[in-house]
Amino acid sequence: MTTLTSAKSFPYDECFLDVTGSEHLFGGAAAIGHDIKRRVKDETGLTCSVGIGYSMMSAKLASEEKKPDGFFEILTRSALRNLIIDRSVRTIYGVGAKTAAELQRLGITTVRDIYNSREAVIQLLGNHSKQIIDLADGIDTRRVEPYSKSKSLGNEHTFQEDIRDFDYLRDVLLLVAQKLSYDIRLMKLYSRTITIKITYSDMKQITRSKSGEPTDRASTIYETAAALLDKIEKRLVRLVGISLSGFSDTPNLQMSLFDSGEDDNHDKLSDAMMKLQQKYGRGIVKTASELRAEKRVWGEE
């Protein structure tokens, strides 16, 4: 299993590839990983990190081990255990800030502590504890699921400092919407349901959703997300994100007698932009609003 992580995007782009059984075609996981790094560099000018692992968690951790522009392999459970045993419990998939804080109150701060305090973890976390203990042991039975079969696709951003400025949050949502639109257009999918996710400074999480006609447009995704943002409680925010669900492989084709043709022109422009982005990279074509949002979010003057 291979995980790819790009060197710069918003936020980091990642994907899993299940290359089981591909040795005879492409030379195995390591050869595929090195080839992908070379081709990404040659075709886009960007670097990426590649992680090879025996499971999804091991591949993800491997991709993060030598950033940026890294290559790392974690091929066995023992190799994974040895690598993470003295690292924070946050290393384990599914252990977020809230769960880590609950574990810390019991004196459980590292993966080693999970090994040594399994009963305490079980009593504290109940059913959720089994996954955490298994992953700490290197047991990960999850399988790579193609996007076309996924129930949802999301992208979120965690801030280093809590954010009170909701205009800034809208700029972040605009960039996230552009990224998600690009992703589902690559997959030739359309989303019926748009959901925003908010984590406040006290770690309380909320979601708000709206369903409508299937769309792949960044403008529709953003406008829906921004409208949902406007309706939530205005206080300090630590994380904001968008997820898409209710996928369809066909758009809304119902037309009115009074359609002006603007939608058709928009689709032609979007198709042209998509071809340029696929050939030269997603950042090659940007709208004025996207450039403005990037300057504010990234501080680029």
Image (cartoon, rainbow, N blue to C red):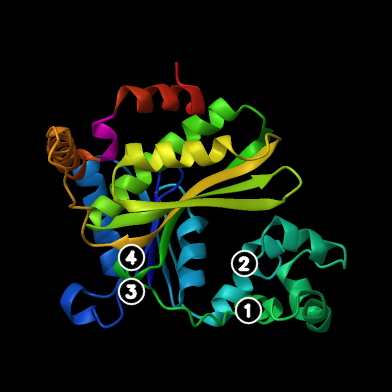
At mark 4, the secondary structure is: helix
Marks 1 and 2 close (CB-CB < 8 Å): yes
CA separation, marks 2 and 4?
Answer: 20 Å
Residue 195, horizontal then vertical, whole percent? 49, 51
Residue lying at 40% horizontally and 21% vertically, measured from the top left? 292
| Residue where numbered disc 4 is placed | 147
- Among the two numbered marks 2 and 3 on one chain, the one whose residue lies closer to the N terminus: 3
Report if the CB atoms under discs 2 and 3 are less than 8 Å apart: no
Camera-side mark, 2 or 3: 2
Sequence-wise, the earlier of marks 1 and 2 is 2
Mark toward the start of the polypeptide (3 vs 1): 3
Q: Residue most toward the front?
A: 257
The residue where tag 3 is placed is: 18
Which secondary structure type mostly characterizes the magenta part of the structure? helix
- Which quarter of the rendered picture does the N terminus lie within? bottom left
Q: Is residue 198 visible?
A: yes
User: Percent from the top left, x then y, of residue 96?
Assistant: 67, 59
| Disc sitting over residue 94 in the figure | 2
Q: Residue at x 78, y 77 (%)?
A: 121
The mark that comes first in sequence, 4 or 3, is 3
Residue 134 among magenta residues:
no
Picture layout, residue 187 above or below residue 138: above
Q: Amino acid at mark 2?
A: Gly
Q: Marks 4 and 2: in contact by CB < 8 Å?
A: no
Which amino acid type is marked by label 1?
Answer: Gln
Say which of marks 3 and 1 sits in front: 1
Spatial separation of the CA atoms under disc 4 and disc 3 = 13 Å
> Which is closer to the viewer, label 4 or label 3?
4
How crowded is the residue under tag 3: few (<14 C-alpha within 10 Å), some, or many (20+)? Answer: some
Mark 2 burial class by Cα count in 10 Å: few <14, some 14-19, many 20+: some
Q: Tag on residue 131?
A: 1
Q: Magenta segment range?
A: 282-286
